[in-house]
Amino acid sequence: MSENIYAVRTNQLRSRMQQEDLRAYLIPMNDFHGSEYIGEYFKTIAWFSGFTGSAATLLVTESESFLWTDGRYFLQAEEQLEGTGIRLMKMGEADVPTGTAYIAGYLQECKQAGKTLRIGFDGRIVSAAYVETLQQEIEKSCGQKAQIEDGKDLAGEIWGAERPALSKEPIWELSLSYAGAGRDIKLKAAQIRMQEQGVDYLILTSLDEIAWIMNLRGNDIAYNPVFLSYLVLSGTRATLYVRNRESLPVFEEAVDVRAYEDFYQDLKSFPAGSRIWLDADTVNYKIVSLLEGKYKIMTAKSPIALEKAVKNHTEIENERLAHIRDGVAVTRFIRWLKTEVRTGKEEATELSAAEKLEGYRKQMPHYLGQSFAPIIAYGSHGAIVHYEPTEGTDIPLGNESFLLADTGGHYLEGTTDITRTIVMGPVTKLQKQHYTAVLMGNLRLMDAKFRYGLSGAHLDYLAREPLYRMGLDFKHGTGHGVGYLLNVHEGPNAIRSRVAEEGVFKQGMITSDEPGLYIEGAYGIRLENLILCVHAEKTEYGQFMQFEPLTFVPFDPEAVDLEMLTGRDKELFEGYQKQVYETLAPYLTEEEKQWLLRETRNL
């Protein structure tokens, strides 16, 4: 039997490590910009391990290999890492150390063996914050910091000529009728923040922040309309570094354009004594190492993130329209599943169903493309949280159990993200109970009313409580922020059980509401709406906030266990279903309207 190709590749990396006298080599799933989703050029982990999830860190030591990923990908990683010799490290599980803790412990053993404490990575794809935490752990364990070799992309050397080229797709301008605020206004607001902080320069590396502030979009990362770039702001000018300069508009504002490849060299040429603001969350280690010691550095959250998350009036009204169009498309898809596929009139697989839904979306005005790879998961595939059907995993849709469909689209009017779990045949009492618990969590979170100042950690319990009462839970966040014709995941707003530095909810923030339940080997259930945070009343106790649904697609009444619903739950369910009908009916044919009326009638 031939040796596993991924084992061969990690062994090749070990040979290069030995030449560089490295104890370990680190490969995060990242690009030069701290992006959640990355272009083909940066998919080094997939090339070395076969793991294709969107979040992971690969560590190769002198004799072993490890891959850390989160609960969304445990099942997927177990399957894809089989036979590679790479050990899966399940983040957050008992007795599983963090990556930084493991490296620190390993280097302690190396020190005891008389070896040098040298580790390597490409400094452009490792965040400065991660390295700081890592060095603190190492110093605590070893009494000294590690020597870092960050200037050589050893993994890229081994990948060699097979590696895809860096993307260079055209860049296009988002007009004011969609953006709602001009580039000049956004740049000026950032420069005012710089002045308040007493800095001379602001360096932006996050691609969605650059796209937002410049009112530009691109296609350098699949499903994310951004472009490879850096932006340096001074008090009076902006310098934009891009790969595709030829496609840029002529800027009326004080904007200089330079080649993307010039950025790191230009970092060395700021005036002596300059005070520079770096984003603590996304800036990579290479940037910090080039600037540190030469300039005065302020690391703090980017001033752009919050401005981008709070949608303006134009963006909100556009988003409402985008979600109506998307709701029509997804509702037609569900009707097709129920009336054609489930009844046996048409045959379909997970992949062909994804194509069918894409066809419905393409019929909508101003549709640009998918906002992430579609998750169409039938039966037991639904238990894999972020399952994506491929030619190798695609299965026919049958007439039993559930189909989980988590999909989204980009429109000129905004970005959508919706999940529905559809009954494809007879379901058991237990399946109904599971579906209803998830439904209750979704509705209760959407119905939340709270005093201003709360973040997602305060609200997460609302979505999980019905599951908690059954001794159940799910291993992913309950909600994430969503960009305007940008990344489908954005901060600072989020809803999750662990306490973190999430943003306080503000009027204009768009967040997902997506509790779920996953029964390994059997089925998965997830129900997701996007919700808009708005002001409620203001009293002597302060400003109160609440959510409004943006997503309008029916929940499946066949899966609801009426005995579980409280009076308030029933009221919320029927109220939402009625709102779905009233919102979508004007855009449907008479036949479609009659079907939707039956789906949304009172229980």
Image (cartoon, rainbow, N blue to C red):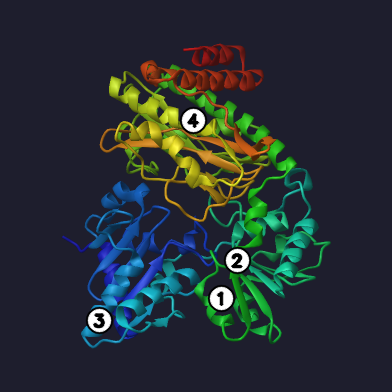
Residue plotted at (80% across, 59% down) = 184
Q: Quadrant of residue 469?
A: top left
Nearer to us of marks 3 and 2 is 3
Q: Secondary structure at mark 4?
A: helix
Q: Which residue appears farthest toward the right when viewing the image?
A: 252
Residue position marked by numbered label 2 in the rendering: 205
Q: CA distance from mark 3 to mark 4?
A: 52 Å
Residue position marked by numbered label 1 in the rendering: 287
Query: Would residue 154 be seen by someone viewing this image from the given angle?
Result: no
Q: CA distance from mark 3 to mark 2?
A: 35 Å
Query: Are dots 3 and 4 in contact, CB under 8 Å?
Result: no
Q: Amino acid at mark 3?
A: Cys
Q: Earlier in the sequence, mark 3 or mark 1?
A: 3
Q: Earlier in the sequence, mark 1 or mark 4?
A: 1
Residue position marked by numbered label 4 in the rendering: 444
Q: Amino acid at mark 1?
A: Ile
The answer to whether residue 55 is above or below residue 460 is: below
Q: Residues within 10 Å of mark 4 (few under 14, many from 20)?
A: many
Query: Are dots 3 and 1 in contact, CB under 8 Å?
Result: no
Residue position marked by numbered label 3 in the rendering: 110
Q: Give the left or right position of residue 565, taking residue 553 as reference.
A: left
Nearer to us of marks 3 and 4 is 4
Q: CA distance from mark 3 to mark 1?
A: 29 Å
Q: Give the left or right position of residue 224, taking residue 254 as reference.
A: left
Is 74 in front, or is 548?
Answer: 548
Q: Earlier in the sequence, mark 3 or mark 2?
A: 3
Nearer to us of marks 3 and 1 is 3
